[in-house]
Image (tube, rainbow, N blue to C red):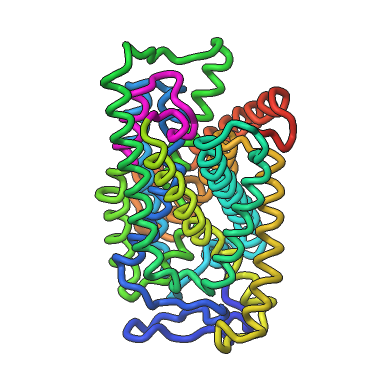
Amino acid sequence: MARATDVEKENLQYDDGLGLEVDDDTAHQISHDPWYQVGFVLTTGVNSAYVLGYSGSIMVPLGWVAGTTGLVLAAAISLYANALLARLHEVGGKRHIRYRDLAGHIYGRKMYALTWALQYVNLFMINTGYIILAGQALKAIYVLYTDDHVLKLPYCIAIAGIVCAMFAFGIPHLSALRIWLGVSTILSLIYIIIAFVLSIRDGVNSPVRDYNIPGSNNSKIFNTIGAVASLVFAYNTGMLPEIQATVKPPVIKNMEKALWFQFTIGGLPLYAVTFMGYWAYGSVTSTYLLNSVKGPVWVKTMANIAAFLQTVIALHIFASPMYEYLDTHYGPGKGNAFSFQNLGFRVMVRGGYLTINTLVAALLPFLGDFMSLTGALSTFPLTFVLANHMYLVVKKNKLSPLQKAWHWLNVVGFSCLAATAAAAALRLIVVDSKTYHLFADL
């Protein structure tokens, strides 16, 4: 196991009441939030506007039996893997407040770099997906009132990117979200309840739906694999240590409380809108459910506005590890977060980062494909492969042969699944790129 360098030791402080060293080399706030605030952070991610796509991206390719079973199994497996990772937050007498720090402590410098690269790809693609979602919500509002096609999706994505950047300038770090987490919860309930109620009404009034899985035999195989990647994407952040860094001691016990909250109460809205959307529209369900529902224009407008605003808040959560890295290594210092220097730095650096996100989102606005590729390339490795292998390395002297075999089965199985899912997702992007041109107005 790699030992802390002298430089690392100089950047350590002690966590009051625990005697644990904490990496103090961060410009953001740590060890400050109660478990329920962290639970709402996790739930904000789970019930983001992405849930409006699961009826079309998960249930349509899998059908009732596989889709329902998959959602429940994915939740159970994700809870287990995240709990393993949470228990590794305190290793070697030190709290590891970043995923890459934990991997570097266990494996060494090379794995530190690889983990950071995987996490960066994961969070970049999630953020790109959020900007696509926000753009879709704006476009959906526009087409409710006119069909002149003047305001195209790439323009809506650009507007969404600007709004996300303005929000990022005003929120210095993850703990500063506080009241915005409550706002996010209200916004989530607005679009989920509206989508749920309108789906019920449409389902009752519509003829018999077709629940057959669409496509040729080959496309069904690839779409199924892509849907499996979307299943794990639905529940996992790829940044659990960074979120756990904000929680008050005892950090493992409190994080486990937050995880149970996420995977029980927090998951109910996801199930409700996903199943109801598929029930109402069957195999023709849109990958953005609000495009399928019928109802009063003002109600659909309210739902899309709520989805747009919630997406802006949720993006900030998944961008926070990148912001923390940039603020810590290149920022002017820890002074007042709203001093001219600090605010100006956020405008330049976060603005630049989100500009790249927005450009990619407008270039390839294929939301379902992004969900599948993100799940394959980074969510599988970070949440399932690495979590199980790190647990094996750290706890190897305390595990029975059967337990070791179980963790190795997870490592090998999820590695194979990640490779297969990545190939399927890339195929989907290639196919969609042939069907739609770059900067497509979907």
Quarter of the image holding residue 344? bottom right
Q: Point out residue 193 in the picture as x, y percentages from the top left corner.
A: 30, 42
Q: Point out residue 355 in the picture as x, y percentages from the top left corner.
A: 70, 57
From the viewer's side, name the closer residue of 227 and 397.
Answer: 227
Q: Which residues are magenta?
A: 270-294
The residue drawn where x is 46% and y is 63% is: 241
| Residue 133 falls left or right of residue 243 | right
From the viewer's side, name the closer residue of 359 and 86.
Answer: 359
The residue drawn where x is 74% and y is 30% is: 437
Which part of the image, by quadrant, shows the N terminus?
Answer: bottom right
Q: Is residue 422 above or below residue 245?
A: above
Quarter of the image holding residue 89? bottom left
| Residue 355 falls left or right of residue 292 | right
Quarter of the image holding residue 371? top right
Q: Is residue 200 magenta?
A: no
Q: Main secondary structure of the magenta part?
A: helix
Which part of the image, by quadrant, shows the C terminus?
Answer: top right
- Viewer can see residue 413: no
Q: Is residue 40 above or below residue 381?
A: below
From the viewer's side, name the closer residue of 287 and 221.
Answer: 287
Q: Is residue 22 above or below residue 266?
A: below
Q: Point out residue 74 in the picture as x, y percentages from the top left corner.
A: 37, 38
* Picture mark count: 0
Q: Point out residue 358 in the picture as x, y percentages from the top left corner.
A: 67, 51
| Residue 4 falls left or right of residue 41 | right
Q: Is residue 273 magenta?
A: yes
